[in-house]
Image: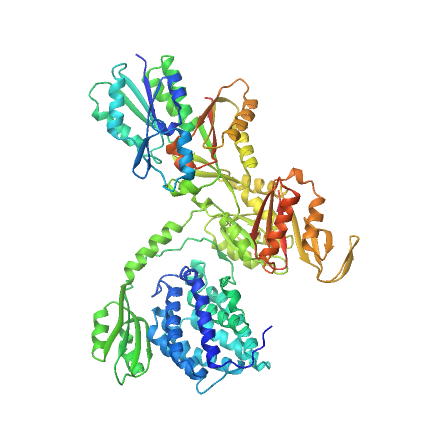
């Protein structure tokens, strides 16, 4: 029996991608006051970003409960006896802890392994997709764990922020906080380092920011997978994806929208690229 | 300008009322300057409340001359004094009232003499006067006033101008006198508060009360380079601070000197001020009970406040800790103008050395900043071609690794700073920053210091001239024309962003006109206007 791959909705794996690669996505919850929505399940990204910009209520997020994970485990343990869970950085979300806690709560028996990816968004998503492809090709649990741990070091997620206000309000700004309060209008470029958001560069304009992301991709010699994603500016992200395509004409570029639970922190106008460097 | 020969009682009250409103506008900024251990965590607020009590009292004696108004102000200050700074302020007013006794109207000479008296009384009220505080500022201000009178001035405005200037210099100098200020990277809060009161008074005399509603008092910058965000060095200090104990004693036949002697051994920072019927006491003591017990044997207690300073100190340390920023590579920028300093600080500059055109900092100034930052690796942005060599000199005087990025203009400095890569090592960053210099063009608009024939241009003295990357390109009477002429010579399709930093003497209305005209001519550009507050240059424009 093939190993089943689970991740959380911080991976930006869309339902299409989940279906294509046989990935199970456990959603986090977005809250507008007392209104609760399951990330990408009971609220679409379009609905969410409309409310993020226009609603006076500031949305918050909560991680899935261990029970939610345990139910997913039990659901899959009918089809398989081995499950690999790859979650977003434990420094950015408690989701990893819930997934670990749920291991003791299943009714059915089986081997469940949980890995902290130390990254987020497509930085996590590309690791999950590649692991799912390996699993489908028949890789065993031990090989998959080895592969994922190596992929964590090869996944390079870089994000352009139109504003850092949302990241700061959500308390996820980490070391990037010194970029706050700039007198000039500055576009910030961050990455995830040691599981936390970290500053990378600052640009004065969207164009310069997109150049930076493009050059980031160009700086790798061998690439295994590529992703481009956005919160609200699909046109700009499409343009960037086309430019990136010229660097790797034969490669599929995964396109996604940043999940509401991440969009809460990313805010409008954010665009990210992820490079999964080849081994 | 408005001419004032004599100030009457009504004007004196109005002046103080206006100065109090002026202080109110920056009270929170003054609060932010606090350094622990201070008895009162909110210097600005405390001084404001003290001044309000003064003004209220003054308005109760409505039809009086200056002498009575000043007396009422002093009485009000004593009754309403809050915190250390408030009590000292009440002493300053007591001295002023003594100096202005029996005067119905006053001129500049009277003001200078009264300030002298105020400084004397303020020093006497304190058991251990500390230099680099409000005390130093009132003394320096009084001396500046005195000198102005000796030079022959008698009108209130001239004398107050000298007083305000003296106070400003004194405030800027406080970090040199008081190490705790230097470490914290701030000027003295009480001194800044007093400066604001004096400056507000001067503005009233000049007839600017109307305009003051739309402006904010200026915060004085230190005269020595201070790191922008140097983390507070929190020594492990086991000495407990005890309780900040404050109250007013009412009764009969008090002798403040005797009370002072009796309480001296009970604690630190003792202030006993007042007269035989009303005395205000402020002390930091381990045992407030003893102080209170003694005081109740003398009279009745009012406005009693006892605060645990160890608790306050812990809170203070927590705040400091959260503010501290670890830096691997420090950047030091030479900048003049409040607005530009803020631009650089907000982009992560570790330390700012004040200076620029016609006020080049010395090697020592820059060296001090290099020594002050908590990092072994330092990048210096001179932002002026005359400062690059000075900065280079620092390399030989310090053990730290130093790279000078040869930025010749403010926009080059900003571009270099933005090129800083957080993931790159020291030498790579130095390279990246040097490369970034050529990515930006700088237009500077300033005034000709003399008439000249240069580069085929005929320039009249004080005429506006425009420089592109240091090269003289245009001259004329209209700055907007000059700027558009210069922009027309450049290929603006190659550029995206224009940032206009307008100078200290440039009106914001004019700056908006300038940016509007750029937007009209080049609609594809992103135009940003920032108050740079730089001297001499009406405009510094960055084109990238």
In the image, residue B407 above or below residue B104: above
Residue B16 located left or right of residue B155: left
Q: Of B477 and A273, which appears nearest the observer? A: B477
Indicate the quadrant where residue B34 lies: bottom left
Indicate the quadrant where residue A146 lies: top left
> Is residue B238 visible in the rendered structure shown here?
no
Q: Of B435 and B95, which appears nearest the observer? A: B95
Q: What is the total number of numbered labels drawn onto the structure image?
A: 0
Residue drawn at 54 percent across, 43 percent down: B418
> Is residue B303 visible in the rendered structure shown here?
yes
**Quadrant holding the C terminus of chain B:** top right
Residue B99 image offset from top left, x and y in percent: 45, 83
**Quadrant holding the N terminus of chain B:** bottom right
Residue B50 image offset from top left, x and y in percent: 37, 71
Residue drawn at 54 percent across, 78 percent down: B156
In the image, residue A157 above or below residue B243: above
Residue drawn at 42 percent across, 24 percent down: A126
Give the colour scheme of this rendering: rainbow
Residue A252 image offset from top left, x and y in percent: 49, 19
Q: Of A221 and B24, which appears nearest the observer? A: B24
Seen from this angle, which residue lies furthest bottom? B102
In the image, residue B477 above or below residue B86: above
Residue B271 image offset from top left, x and y in percent: 33, 74
Residue B385 located left or right of residue B183: right
């Amino acid at each position: 029996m093939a190993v089943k791959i689970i991740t959380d909705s911080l991976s930006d794996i869309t339902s299409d991608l989940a279906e294509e690669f046989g990935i199970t996505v456990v959603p986090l919850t977005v809250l507008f006051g007392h209104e609760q929505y399951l990330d990408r399940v009971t609220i679409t990204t379009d609905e969410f970003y409309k409310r993020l910009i226009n609603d006076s209520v500031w949305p918050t997020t909560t991680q899935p409960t261990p029970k939610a994970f345990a139910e997913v485990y039990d659901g899959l343990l009918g089809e398989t006896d081995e499950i690999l869970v790859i979650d977003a950085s434990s420094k950015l979300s408690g989701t990893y802890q819930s997934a670990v806690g749920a291991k003791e709560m299943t009714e059915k028996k089986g081997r469940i392994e949980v890995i902290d990816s130390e990254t987020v968004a497509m930085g996590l998503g590309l690791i999950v997709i590649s692991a799912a492809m390996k699993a489908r090709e028949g890789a065993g649990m031990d090989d998959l764990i080895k592969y994922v741990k190596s992929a964590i070091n090869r996944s390079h997620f870089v994000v352009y922020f139109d504003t850092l206000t949302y990241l700061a309000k959500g308390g996820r700004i980490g070391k990037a906080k010194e970029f706050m309060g700039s007198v000039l209008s500055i576009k910030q470029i961050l990455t995830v380092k040691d599981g936390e958001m970290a500053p990378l560069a600052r640009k004065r304009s969207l164009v310069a920011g997109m150049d930076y992301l493009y050059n980031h991709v160009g700086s790798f010699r061998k690439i295994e997978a590529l992703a481009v994603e956005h919160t609200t500016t699909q046109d700009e992200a499409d343009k960037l994806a086309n430019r990136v395509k010229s660097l790797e004409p034969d490669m599929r570029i995964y396109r996604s929208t940043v999940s509401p639970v991440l969009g809460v922190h990313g805010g409008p106008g954010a665009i990210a690229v992820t490079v999964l460097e080849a081994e | 300008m408005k001419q004032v020969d004599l100030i009457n009682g009504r004007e004196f009250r109005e002046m103080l009322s206006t100065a109090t409103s002026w202080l109110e506008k920056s009270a929170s900024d003054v609060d932010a300057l606090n350094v622990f251990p201070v008895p009162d965590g909110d210097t600005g607020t405390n001084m404001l409340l003290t001044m309000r009590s003064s003004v209220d009292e003054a308005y109760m004696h409505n039809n009086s001359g200056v002498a009575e108004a000043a007396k009422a102000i002093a009485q009000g200050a004593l009754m309403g004094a809050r915190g250390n700074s408030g009590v000292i302020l009440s002493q300053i007013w007591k001295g002023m009232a003594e100096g202005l006794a029996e005067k119905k109207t006053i001129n500049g000479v009277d003001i200078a003499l009264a300030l002298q008296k105020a400084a004397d009384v303020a020093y006497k009220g304190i058991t251990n006067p500390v230099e680099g505080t409000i005390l130093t500022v009132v003394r320096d201000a009084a001396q500046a006033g005195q000198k102005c009178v000796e030079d022959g001035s008698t009108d209130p405005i001239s004398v107050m101008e000298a007083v305000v200037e003296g106070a400003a210099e004194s405030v800027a100098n406080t970090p040199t006198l008081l190490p705790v200020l230097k470490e914290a990277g701030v000027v003295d809060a009480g001194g800044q508060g007093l400066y604001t009161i004096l400056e507000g008074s001067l503005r009233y005399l000049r007839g600017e009360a109307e305009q003051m509603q739309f402006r904010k008092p200026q915060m004085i910058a230190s005269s020595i380079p201070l790191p922008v965000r140097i983390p507070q060095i929190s020594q492990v200090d086991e000495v407990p601070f005890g309780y900040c104990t404050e109250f007013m004693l009412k009764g009969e036949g008090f002798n403040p000197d005797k009370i002072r002697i009796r309480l001296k051994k009970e604690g630190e920072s003792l202030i006993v001020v007042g007269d035989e019927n009303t005395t205000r006491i402020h002390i930091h003591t381990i045992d407030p009970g003893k102080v209170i017990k003694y005081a109740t044997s003398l009279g009745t207690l009012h406005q009693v406040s006892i605060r645990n300073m160890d608790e306050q100190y812990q809170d203070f340390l927590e705040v400091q800790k959260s503010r501290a920023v670890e830096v691997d590579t420090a950047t030091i920028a030479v900048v003049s103008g409040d607005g530009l300093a803020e631009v650089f600080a907000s982009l992560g500059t570790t330390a700012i050395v004040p200076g620029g055109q016609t006020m080049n900092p010395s090697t020592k100034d820059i060296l001090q900043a290099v020594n002050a930052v908590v990092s072994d690796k330092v990048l210096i942005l001179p932002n002026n071609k005359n400062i690059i060599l000075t900065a280079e000199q620092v390399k030989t005087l310090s053990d730290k690794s130093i790279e000078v990025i040869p930025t010749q203009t403010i926009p080059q400095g900003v571009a270099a700073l933005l090129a800083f890569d957080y993931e790159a090592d020291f030498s790579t960053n130095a390279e990246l920053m040097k490369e970034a210099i050529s990515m930006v063009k700088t237009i500077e608009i300033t005034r000709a210091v003399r008439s000249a024939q240069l580069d085929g241009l005929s320039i009249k003295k004080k005429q506006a001239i425009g420089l592109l990357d240091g090269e003289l390109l245009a001259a004329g009477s209209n700055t907007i024309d000059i700027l558009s002429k210069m922009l027309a010579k450049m290929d603006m399709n190659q550029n995206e962003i224009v940032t206009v930093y307008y100078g200290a003497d440039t009106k914001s209305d004019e700056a908006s006109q300038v940016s509007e005209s750029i937007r009209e001519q080049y609609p594809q550009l992103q135009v940003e206007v920032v108050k740079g507050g730089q001297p001499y240059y009406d405009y510094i424009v960055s084109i990238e």
